[in-house]
Structure formats: C-alpha cells, structure tokens
Image (cartoon, rainbow, N blue to C red):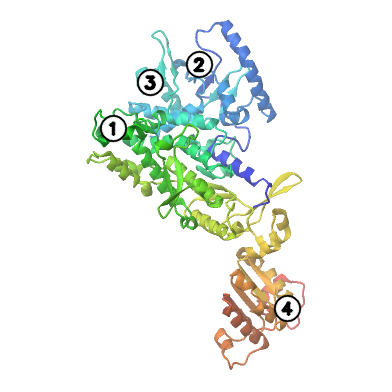
Amino acid sequence: FGRSGAGKSSILEGLAKACSGLRSLSRQRAPDGRSGLILRLGLGESGDTEEDLENMATSFEGESAKFDQRISEVGLDPIADGLHTWTAAALIGDDGMAEIVETNQTWDYHNEINYPIQGLLERAAEVAVELAGGMDRNLVIDPDDVVHLHRVTNAFLNSRNLLLASTGEMSLALDANPEVRASLGCLATSMERARSSGFFDVGDSTSSYGQLTRLVSPLYDFAERYRRSPNRWLIHPTWKMEVDTRKRSEFFEPELSRGMGRAVYLGGNIEQSVKDFERALTDAMPILHDRLIGPLLIRRHETFGLTDERLDVARSGILAPMSPGLAKVGDSPDNPWWEQIIPTGGVDVRQTVRACCVLLANRANELLPDFFQEHGEIVVLPPSIRKWTTVSQSHIRIYLDQDGSRIPLESVGSGIRRWLIAVVDWAYQDLLSANLEEISRFSGGNTPIHERVEFVGKLSECAPTIDVRTGFLIVDEPELHLDPRAQLQVAKWLKAVSEEGKSIVLASHSPAFLTYQSHEATLTAVMSVAGMTTIQDMSTGLLEWCQEYGELVGLTHADTIMLCAGFIVVEGLHDSKVLRHFFSNQLAAARVELLHLHGTHQGEEALINTEFFAGLGKPVGILLDNIRHNRDQILRPDGRLTSEEKALKRMWMALEHQGVKVAAGGHPYPDVMCALPEDAVRRAFPSAEFSGWD
C-alpha cells in the first residue's frame, strides 16, 4: 500500500520475474559447482583451421568484452566466479546471450554436450515440455530414452553455474550426478535411438560425434516471437516448467525459494488497448490449441479423417480448407458450395480452434468475479473471415454477452474492460498449465467418436472439469476505474480467492484494500523517502499506524475511520486510557476504535442525534460505569435505573431505531479500574498506592 510513484509496481514486477525463474532479484554468488557434466560453448567447429579459429576469436572478443563489462558492473569476476545462466541473460539480455552462444559438436567420450546457436536453456525447456506431454508424446520411441532425456533436461534446467574461461569459452556446469552422466553416455552412444528421437543429428560415417538439433516446436516458435515482443501480456509458455527452485540459491532470496509456484500477473501495462491484447491472444491461441487439443487430434486423426490436415496449428495456422461435405459438390457456379467458398477462398477457422475459444471463455467466466457477472458473460470467438483484414491481425475477438447482445470489448467501460482482459489472461494461463487428466479420459475408451462436430461439442464441455493449479496471483492496482463500492467488492472477491488456497500479492493505494483483518492479509506500507523506496509492516496496529504515518501513504483521517471494523463508546479519556493499556493488542487486532462521550448527559444526546454510525454501517459497542441491570431490565418502562443506565437506554433505543447494530453494556462499579482484576492492576502499576487495598 502506498502513494502513486512510491515503487509498488516495481516490487510486483520484480516478484513476477523472480517467480518465472528468468530473472534475478538477488545477485548473490552461488557456491562453486564446477565438477561434473559440462555444457561447453566454444568458438568453432571440428575441422576449423587455426587461422579460422583465430579470426573467430577476434570477432568474439568484442562481445566477450561487453559481457565481462556487464559482469564486473555487478561485482562479479567473470574468470574466477561461477555465474548462473539466468543471471547472465538478465545482465546482457536474451538476445545478447543468444548471440554469444556459438555452435560446436558433441564428443561422446568427453561427457560434453555442445548446443548449436540459441540452443541453451530454451532448448532444454522445449524438450522438457515435450517430454512432459505438452506435444504429441512421440518425441522418443524407446522408453529408456524418455528417462534419460528427462534426467539430462532437468539437470540443464537446474544447473547452478555458467563458467567463463579466459579463452572466451563458457561452460554450463551441472551437478556431478552419476545418473546424469550415465544418461548422457547412453544418449551419446546410442546413435540409432538418438536419430529416431530427433534429438541428435549424427555426423558422417567417419565422425565420432553427434550434434544436438534445434527441434522447432510450436512452443519454441511462440516463445521466441513473444520474447521479442515489446508488448508482452500473456504468460511466457516456458515459465510453467517444473524447475527445482531450491537449487537456484544465486537468484532467489531464501523466502522466495520455498515451493514457489507459477505466478499469474494481472498487471503490466494497465492501459493496454483491446486491439493489442486481442492481437496477442491471436498469436497465442495456436499454442493453447496444441496444448489442449493437439494430443487428442493426433490420437484420433484416423477416426476423424484428418490425415490431409496439419494437426500442428502453431505451424499451419488456425485456418483449414472447408469441407466439401457441407454441400453438394459440383462444378456449377450456382452450387451452394461455391457460394460458400468464394468469399473466403475456401478456408474457414478450424472447428477445434473454435472449441479452444469456448474452453477459454468457459474458464474465464468461472474466474470472473461475482460483481462483474451481472454485466454479462465473456465470449471468445474468431470473427467471420469476411471481416479479416491485413490491417487488423486480431483474428480472435473478445465480447461481453448481455442477454444475447454481444458487445465488443472496446465498447465496454474501462473499469470492467480492464478486469475482463485480466480474467481472460488468467484463464489462458490456467489452461496452458492445466492438468489434462479429464480431457485425456474423455479422449480414451473403446467407443469411437466418428463425428467431429460431436467431438468438438463434447470437448467444449470439458472446461469445468479441467484441474488447474495456479500458484498465486499478482494484482497491480485492482481499484482502477472502479467506484468505491466496486472496490470493496473486488477486495471481498480476492479474499474469497485466497480462501480457496491461492496466494495473492496486490499493490494498491485505495483504502478499500486495507479492510482485511490481520489474520487475513499482511499489509505493507511502501513509501518513498529521500528518493528511496522503503517498506514498513502495517498489519499490526493498523489504526495507530495510520494515525501516525498515514500521510506518508496518502491516507486521511476520514480513511482511518473507514478502516475501523467497529467502535466502542466510553464515557471519557480516562476509560479509553485504561482499555488501551490493558487491551491494546486485542483492540489493534480487531481494528476497534474508541470514542468518547465525555460524560453521560450532553454526550449521549450528540451520539443519539448523529447519523454518523448509521451511515458507516459498522457495529457499535457502548461501555459505561454503574450498569447494574441486564438489557431486559433496563428497557422496562418502570425500572429503577442509575443515571448511566438511563443514558444507555436512550442511546440503545435511538441507535437501534436508526438501524445501528449495538452491543451495549458495562460494569456495576463506579470506575472502570474497579472492574479490572486486582492482581492485574498491581502488576501494571507496582509502585502505585491504592487506598483500601492493603
């Protein structure tokens, strides 16, 4: 919580990068770990002459010097110290890292793997996705290869250090794990299995080495395009890789290294246009399609008669030839089939892509907060091909359906529109990393599905059964463009999401998001002091903290009153001092503010006549001296009451008449000090003398 410009969004962006595992929050030096398997990135290939290598070294020297300079700027020695690959990429950028990495060979007797250009961890992540079942599950044939490749890939992803030698070589050192070494040996020596897997290119008959190939999967292509995009919104697909964060001690602070899950970042460019988002969604839809539906199509391609189609939508696009079976085929221009294909060139959006849009919309509507559902439902679908233009690349559109009327997203109010975009983004990320057990179960069985329409229809109904496991949400300024009532509804909804088991980190400067109790949320103040961003805990004693420091985070006294969970009315300052002395922790935790009557004569009239409590709608407690009867006795018309009881009766009846929830009462003693246990008072004031207590 803090003022605009205090640094809240920067903290969230740093957290999002740390969760993805692609950037470094902490540039601590990792322990030395240079023994074991080596991924060596050299300057040339086998057969290069010394002159060739010298020329390469000269051309490499400039980039190497830039690299070393960036390393030294953060206090690391590029020769003596190990540097994690993610940190290196953070320092010089992904593109710079790819330019430095050069092609070399794999020599099976060296226990080394040399990647071709742009093949480092991007290739390892790609292989791991495919091995995890993200593609067609046919990457390798022999079951042993699956085990070996999975083990080696995990070793790459969890490697600790990138070693830099004075010669300009860089080596990725893996843990000295005998199983990993054995797996690499099996893969390197089993060239037939390597060839069949597509993982290696085997050299000529006289060569004793094989080179790792760059299998250009749809995921890799999408990741590469999106990595270069200046307007990233949807999650980077490779973020969902299961990497052991406990081994990343170099760039994870201890509190960030315990079971960190995948993050959904509902933030970023808050004024992103609908066209930008829909264009990004259009680019990303093939990946979601191949992730959710691709495996099913591959298994069923003979049943569906899809042999003439490219099942890989990320490579072949979301369009497919229109089926002549929709109408009688003939050469006559009057044939309805010709009328159908002429405007679009005989192509249409794939039915499975439409099903994927339905899956995305269904999941988005599940995630949509209750207070937005009254405005309508989210619809995701491709527009008619006749409306496609070369100017607009948004071939997947988002609408708000209100009683059958579809409103384009750009025509929706800005406050609602921002949340609809965020929820569609969240739904996309959920589905991209969904547990596909239910979909797989649906695709199996002995009963064949002969009709593709039936298949697509049933597939679209699977969304409620998809098991998704979002690690946590990062929400930036959820109050934007929303009225105060809607902000409170957002806060309530986020609390409900948290209670479902998801962790939430949000940044805000609206008091609506300070209404959480101390057991529901940790509140942190973000302040800019002398140009530096500082943070302070404000969870405990929030009201007291706001009274003292509220101005630093943009809070007024009126905001502090709104943050109270309730009020206790006492007679005077003496009573409030006693209560705060003995019950300060309980009052702070409950966020209860003490108000003074300053006597039970004029004060009670002011309390009765005010509409303050009725307007706030918060509970009120009244604590007075000399209260010797219960509620029923006090409210009797003929009861004999003390002056305090008479005042309490008038306040009780007047406030409840205004609709204020009142919990009134007191103690029978003339002073609140007398109502406290004697031992407690003596311990609190050991040097005080109380007459009559001896």
**Residue type indicated by callout 4:** His
Q: Which class describes the residues within 10 Å of circle 2: few (<14), some (14-19), or many (20+)?
A: many
Q: Position of residue 573 (x, y in %)?
A: 73, 74
Mark 3: secondary structure: helix
User: Which residue is the site of mark 3?
Assistant: 194
User: Which residue is the site of mark 4?
Assistant: 598
Quadrant holding the C terminus: bottom right
Say above or below: 435 vs 142. Answer: below
Mark 4: secondary structure: loop
**Residue type indicated by callout 2:** Asn
- Kindly report the distance in space between the C-alpha atoms of the residues bearing marks 4 and 2: 86 Å
393 and 107: which is toward the camera? 393
Q: Which quadrant of the structure image shows residue 319? A: top left
Q: Which quadrant of the structure image shows residue 95? A: top right
**Residue type indicated by callout 1:** His
Say above or below: 237 vs 470. Answer: above
- Left or right: 556 with respect to 187? right
Mark 1: secondary structure: helix
User: Which residue is the site of mark 2?
Assistant: 104
User: Which residue is the site of mark 1?
Assistant: 301
- Kindly report the distance in space between the C-alpha atoms of the residues bearing marks 1 and 3: 26 Å
Q: Is residue 101 visible?
A: yes
Q: Give the foreground label among 1 and 3.
A: 1
Q: Which class describes the residues within 10 Å of circle 3: few (<14), some (14-19), or many (20+)?
A: many
Q: Position of residue 328 (x, y in %)?
A: 23, 34
